[in-house]
Amino acid sequence: MTDRYPDFSLAYYSSDRKTGELAVIDHAQGEVQVRVLPTEEESALGKALKPVLVGLDENRRVILLDPASKTLRIQDSFPVDAFPAHIYKDPKSARDWFMNDGDKQTGNDTLNCGDQGSSVTVVEHTNSSQARFLATLCVGRGHHQACFSHPSEHAPQVPSQAYISNLKDGSISVIGNDPADPASYLKVVATINLCEPEKESEMTAPGLPNNAFPHGLVYSPLSGKVYNLNNGYGTVAVIDPVTHAIERRFDFKGHSNLFITPDGRYIIGRGADRKSDPEHVLARLTVIDTWDHRIGDSLILPDVYISKYFFDPEGRRLYLTTSSSGSPEQQQNLKTDALLVFDLDSLPELKLARELRLGSPSGTLEFVQQEGRTRLILSSNAGQGELLILDADSLEIVRRIAVSEPRSHSRIWLLG
């Protein structure tokens, strides 16, 4: 790769979902250096007590959170069984929110919440020596997703709040997210019951827990509304962030997650049909217009199971990674290494602009800008132990960088 591409520094985490390692990749003037951080042996701690991986500071030292004492420590080595929690970044602040889904059977975080739910942890300046633990809050029982409301030109009345969906409870926890309002800041201010009694059985009480199974949570600064997908019911609940009331619901069957375009105009639902064809998984994408909540274009993609979604910083393109799911017969036909590229200019019509084959499933993507334009797309491919560098204009792979031994899971993030 020539030096005409911009420089970048990147953290690369790879694991077998039990133990892992961290590497730092530096690209400068066309030269690449990969440094695997020294490791510590696996501890004998239970999952709830394993250190949480927060980030890397300016000197590429590991930042860890002790879940029991809630203290941060910075060190040169990486504990191989450090827990890489699912992170949601608050787009309007330097705060990151770490999800703790709790025990697999009960969904409870017994360390922090006993048998009353699981938790989220908020850390400020995560990739800096100034990293600061702010709070661990008990919410409903996991799995969790998060989104953040904030005032905007079109919805100036909306408060700054975090919304955390609780899969096992069928609820949403609302948390104050405005440091200027100490009465509500980092406190649970409301719990939204997602129950639709008419969809529950006669044996189920119309309360909490219920069978809503929320998984898909977005906020639109255009409409000033929060949208939650209830997988158990096949509906979307439209929530007023001022009153926390569910204003309306509409059917949206066949989808398992939501994501929203950077301008807040369109919500895209993704789903997978594993039942219609015994030999082929059928991915589904459907558009919702937040102006009028009208359901628009829907696209079926054969032999694709959509894994993760990414928007480039300009909001010009949507990137979808793929992975494996379905029966053995269906998996034989799946494109598990595909990267699907959509041009957002075509919305509300969904048009697949390009399908790339990366050689193995991508873990996550990052984007490197230069003078306000995305120049590089970076993809972590754990199955090959590589970092792929793609030219953002041509979408061609311009370099493959060997990082680690092949593993099942990877995650990358840019370093300052």
Image (tube, rainbow, N blue to C red):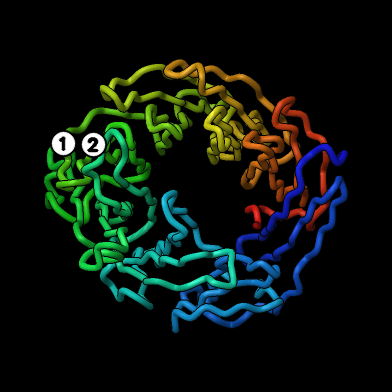
Give the numbered dot on residue 238: 2
Give the numbered dot on residue 340: none
Q: Spatial distance from mark 1 to mark 2, Cα to Cα?
A: 6 Å
Say which residue appears at 59% left-offset and 82% top-offset.
44
Above or below: residue 168 compared with residue 328: below
Q: Residues within 10 Å of mark 2 (few under 14, many from 20)?
A: many
Q: Is residue 337 left or right of residue 7?
A: left
Give the numbered dot on residue 247: 1
Say which amino acid is labelled 1: Glu
Q: Position of residue 91 (x, y in %)?
A: 44, 49
Q: Position of residue 126 (x, y in %)?
A: 53, 65
| Nearer-the-camera pick, 406 or 362 | 362
Q: Is residue 275 left or right of residue 159?
A: right
Say which residue appears at 73% left-offset and 50% top-offset.
8
Say which amino acid is labelled 2: Val
Above or below: residue 114 compared with residue 139: below
Q: Do callouts 1 and 2 mark residues in contact (Cβ within 8 Å)?
A: yes
Q: Secondary structure at mark 2?
A: strand
Say which residue appears at 57% left-offset and 74% top-offset.
64
